[in-house]
Amino acid sequence: MNFHTIATLAFVIPNVYLFLRIGRLFINKGYRFQYAMIYLLLVAIYPFVSFFSVGKSGFVYDILSWTAGYYLPFYLYMFLSVLLFDLLLLVNWLTKIVPWDKMKSTRFKVSCMLVFVLVSSLTVFAGAINFNTIRISEYRIEVPKKLSDIDHLKIAFASDFHLKQQSDVQFVVRFVAKVNAVRPDLMIFGGDIVEGRGDGGKMDRIAKMLSGIQTKYGVFAVLGNHESYGVQAKGHFFDKAGMQPLCDSVAVIGHSFNLAGRYDNRYYERKATVDLLKSINNSLPVILIDHRPTEIEENSKTMADVQFSGHTHNGQLFPLNLILERIYRLSWGYEKIGHTHFFVSSGIMLWGPPVRTTGKSEIMVVDVDFK
């Protein structure tokens, strides 16, 4: 079953359930036709924006896109609220705590519906604030110095920007200011940085802003799965933004450390990590960038001292993070496995709804002591 089939089912099934249950529980029979029309109209906004207004601009399209962005998380939490309510109904059917006549009253129905709408709206509102708040996650680790000529390296790491024409320029301005404020020696981007062609208009402005990141050793990046959907494998946006892409390649930074970057696993001919690192001089520490944290245990057996990944968004919306925790050994945060330090970012921006109810919009700052 491919991603688009799963995404379609994940959209349709909860909406069918929510439509039927709200209609049965809270809508009087005389108003069910009007209810059905309004509900179907709202449901149609997201697929319309996704399939028919891609790349288009204008007031109407912007409003529809904005509505669709908040529609999905709102209905997710409406679905969870009604599902929880149905479970409570089952418990009440067994225990008879609330009389059935009271539950059938109009006042009870209206009160429950208002609670569902209020809880879902507040959750989305809080998630939007959480998304727009950039946070710094700080870590400190020790790595064998070997023959490196430095004792310390401060790394700033960000992943999953998903930049496009509709992206908020001021968010990028705040991001660059945050990065420069921590004075990193090295800036790493972990893939899924740009959507589509990544050129023209606002994207050129965003690239220029990102080129203002100041570091000692440079700004490096890998390609994510979303770059493979567009034309970014050619690296046009990266060049404008002052980023050096590492595509199954290694950069030797002076006599200080090795920096290796892998293709995303959508590139079927990408090298295995052990093959990529085979030519590396092991007399220097090795930092690896791998967009997806899917091969953590395998990579822990290589000469990589540190690995940075993204892709997961830490689920973005609760309870999806609980599912990802079952899929990945490390879906977000930090873990040391063997001699290798692994970092997985929850992302700096998002793909899809501008709402984050799990995780944070983060810049990871890692102080590495070479000893």
Image (cartoon, rainbow, N blue to C red):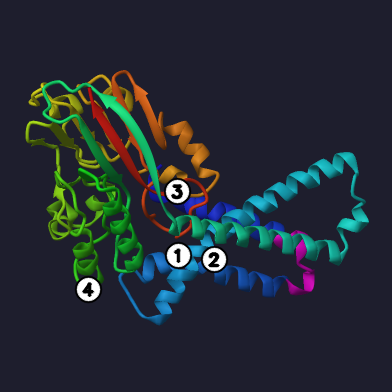
Can you identify the residue that label 2 sits on?
43
Marks 2 and 1 close (CB-CB < 8 Å): yes
N-terminal label among 4 and 3: 4
Q: Which of marks 4 and 2 is in front?
A: 4
- Image point 68% across, 71% down: which residue? 35
Marks 1 and 3 close (CB-CB < 8 Å): no
| Region in magenta | 22-31
Q: Label 1, label 3: how many angstroms apart (C-alpha)?
A: 27 Å
Q: Residue 116's spot in the image, x, y percent?
A: 69, 59
Q: Which of marks 3 and 2 is in front?
A: 3
Can you identify the residue that label 3 sits on?
360
- Image point 8% across, 24% down: which residue? 281
N-terminal label among 1 and 3: 1
User: Element at badge 1?
Assistant: helix
N-terminal label among 1 and 4: 1
Amino acid under disc 2 = Val
Q: Which of marks 1 and 4 is in front?
A: 4
Magenta highlight on residue 305: no
Can you identify the residue that label 1 sits on?
47
Residue toward you, 72 or 222: 222
Q: In this view, does 255 lie to the left or right of 191?
A: left
User: Element at badge 2?
Assistant: helix
Q: Which of marks 4 and 3 is in front?
A: 3
Say if 227 sits above or below 257 in the image: below
Marks 4 and 3 close (CB-CB < 8 Å): no
Say if 256 sits above or below 176 in the image: above
Q: Quadrant of the C terminus?
A: top left
How packed mark 1 is, by other alpha carbons closer than 10 Å (few <14, some 14-19, many 20 or more), is: few
Residue toward you, 107 or 133: 133
Amino acid under disc 4 = Gly
